[in-house]
Image: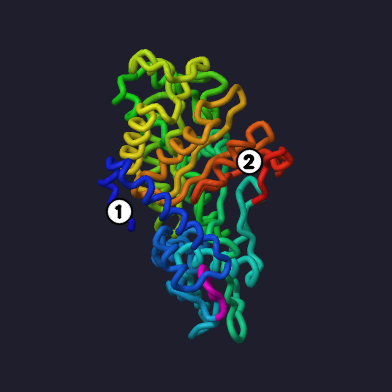
């Protein structure tokens, strides 16, 4: 049922089929006691990664340590159902680690280093790490140690993380961060780096000029607000240099190559309907809500679907796919045209789920009582999840709130 990326343009034909398949997939991922066969089906939408990538990680974080480990991939563990890893004493004093993907392998390495060797694996700003070559490597003990993930996906980051911190990262910083994520068992992260170059290429095809586009973006430290619907103005600390867009685009390719090799998945940014306001005049389209320099498109507008399709074509051609996409649903200055009304919400959903490569999507929901309908709409769509970065569950107190 996984169709090729080249079939992206056949939009309407696959919409209902993908909704059905997404619902089946979500059920499989949600089963806490899934069988090995069920896990195999769900695992098709995860990156397995490679054993060599895990050995390379060991070389980076603890040079000289990889010869102590025997690593391998397996479809199951001796005393835990997948996704899982298993630690055991091997020949010649080595430690054998098996895992159902490279992500479980790296998590197993992290557990061994932290819990058996008493090492600290941390961030530089949080005190750093205490990683060393032990004089005598600890053993695992009889029967080994099998552990299963509590949930198929372990997620990190919100939309603010990227412009508040990660835009200043060079590749060496990203390498350390990715290794920390891998050793901590994280297998799903927000992959927003380089999206402005994708947007630039898409918007240019719809007639927007270089100045229109680059002045619409904020500067690097304030990109969160450009990406988050441009509610607080455009061109703050801008215009965004094209050279910076291309540099970040290249960085994203490095990031995704590394994370995929380690069995991790990145949530790529989907089209969420906010565009430079000049597009209203270019397209002679008044079906857009003007808010300063930004126009919010109604998701039932045919132009919305055209831009969303071109966005996905460009995104997948540039970065490939991990079958996860995220939208930033933060609205503070007003109501987006597709926030209210079932038809509009379904159209927005279809802009992602109708893509043959789409399996799951997340919304950065920033849920509150005022945005309760948006959060509920997200949670009731097949294979959508809400990454609630704000409410601390307060939105559930609204009269029509749902629990779950």
- Mark sitting on residue 389: 2
Separation (CA) of disc 2 from disc 1: 33 Å
- Quadrant of the frame with the N terminus: bottom left
Tell me which residue sits at (38%, 50%) in the image: 18
Front tag of 2 and 1: 1
* Residue 126 counted in the magenta span: no
How packed mark 2 is, by other alpha carbons closer than 10 Å (few <14, some 14-19, many 20 or more), is some
Tell me which residue sits at (35%, 25%) in the image: 203
Q: Where 102 sits versus 296, above or below?
A: below
Q: Is residue 129 left or right of residue 166?
A: right
- Mark 2 vs mark 1: which is more N-terminal? 1
- Mark sitting on residue 36: none
Q: Secondary structure at mark 1?
A: loop
Residue 59: percent from left, percent from top: 46, 62
Q: Where 268 sits versus 371, above or below?
A: below
Q: Residue furthest left?
A: 6
Residue 168: percent from left, percent from top: 51, 36
SS assignment for the magenta stretch, majority: loop
Q: Is residue 286 left or right of residue 178?
A: left
Q: Where 361 sits versus 145, above or below?
A: above
Q: Can the viewer see residue 211?
A: yes
Q: Quadrant of residue 388?
A: top right
- Residue placed most toward the observer, 32 or 47: 32
Q: Residue under circle 1?
A: 3
Tell me which residue sits at (50%, 77%) in the image: 96
Residue 211: percent from left, percent from top: 37, 16
Q: Quadrant of residue 340?
A: top right
Tell me which residue sits at (39%, 62%) in the image: 44
Q: Which residues are magenta?
A: 79-86
Q: Can the viewer see residue 68?
A: no
């Amino acid at each position: 049922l996984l169709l090729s990326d080249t079939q992206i343009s056949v939009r309407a034909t696959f919409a209902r089929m993908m909704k059905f398949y997404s619902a089946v997939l979500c059920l499989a991922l949600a089963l806490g006691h899934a069988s090995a066969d069920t896990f195999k089906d769900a695992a098709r939408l995860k990156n397995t990664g490679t054993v060599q990538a895990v050995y390379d990680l060991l070389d980076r974080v603890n040079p000289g340590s990889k010869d102590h480990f025997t690593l391998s991939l397996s479809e199951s563990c001796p005393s835990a159902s997948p996704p899982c890893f298993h630690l055991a004493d091997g020949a010649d004093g080595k430690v054998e680690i098996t895992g159902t993907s490279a992500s479980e392998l790296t998590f197993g390495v992290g557990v061994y280093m932290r819990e058996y060797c008493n090492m600290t694996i941390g961030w530089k700003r949080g005190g750093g790490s205490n990683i060393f070559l032990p004089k005598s490597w600890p053993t695992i003990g009889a029967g080994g140690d099998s552990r299963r993930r509590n949930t198929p996906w372990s997620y990190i980051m919100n939309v603010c993380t990227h412009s508040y911190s990660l835009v200043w990262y060079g590749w060496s910083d990203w390498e350390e961060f990715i290794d920390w994520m891998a050793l901590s068992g994280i297998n799903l992260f927000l992959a927003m780096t380089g999206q402005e170059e994708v947007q630039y290429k898409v918007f240019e095809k719809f007639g927007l000029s270089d100045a229109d586009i680059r002045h619409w973006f904020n500067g690097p430290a304030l990109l969160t607000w450009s990406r988050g619907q441009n509610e607080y103005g455009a061109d703050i600390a801008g215009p965004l240099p094209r050279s910076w867009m291309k540099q970040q685009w290249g960085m994203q390719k490095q990031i995704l190559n590394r994370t995929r090799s380690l069995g991790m998945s990145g949530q790529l940014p989907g089209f969420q309907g906010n565009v430079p306001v000049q597009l209203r005049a270019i397209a002679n389209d008044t079906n857009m809500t003007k808010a300063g320099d930004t126009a919010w498109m109604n998701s039932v507008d045919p132009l919305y679907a055209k831009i969303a399709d071109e966005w996905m074509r460009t995104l997948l051609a540039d970065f490939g796919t991990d079958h996860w996409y995220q939208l930033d649903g933060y609205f503070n200055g007003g109501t987006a045209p597709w926030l209210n009304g079932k038809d509009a919400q379904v159209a927005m959903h279809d802009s992602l789920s109708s893509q043959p490569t789409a399996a799951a999507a997340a919304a950065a929901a920033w849920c509150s009582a005022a945005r309760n309908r948006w959060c509920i709409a997200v949670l009731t769509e097949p294979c959508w999840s809400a990454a609630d970065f704000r409410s601390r569950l307060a939105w559930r107190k609204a009269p029509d709130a749902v629990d779950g």
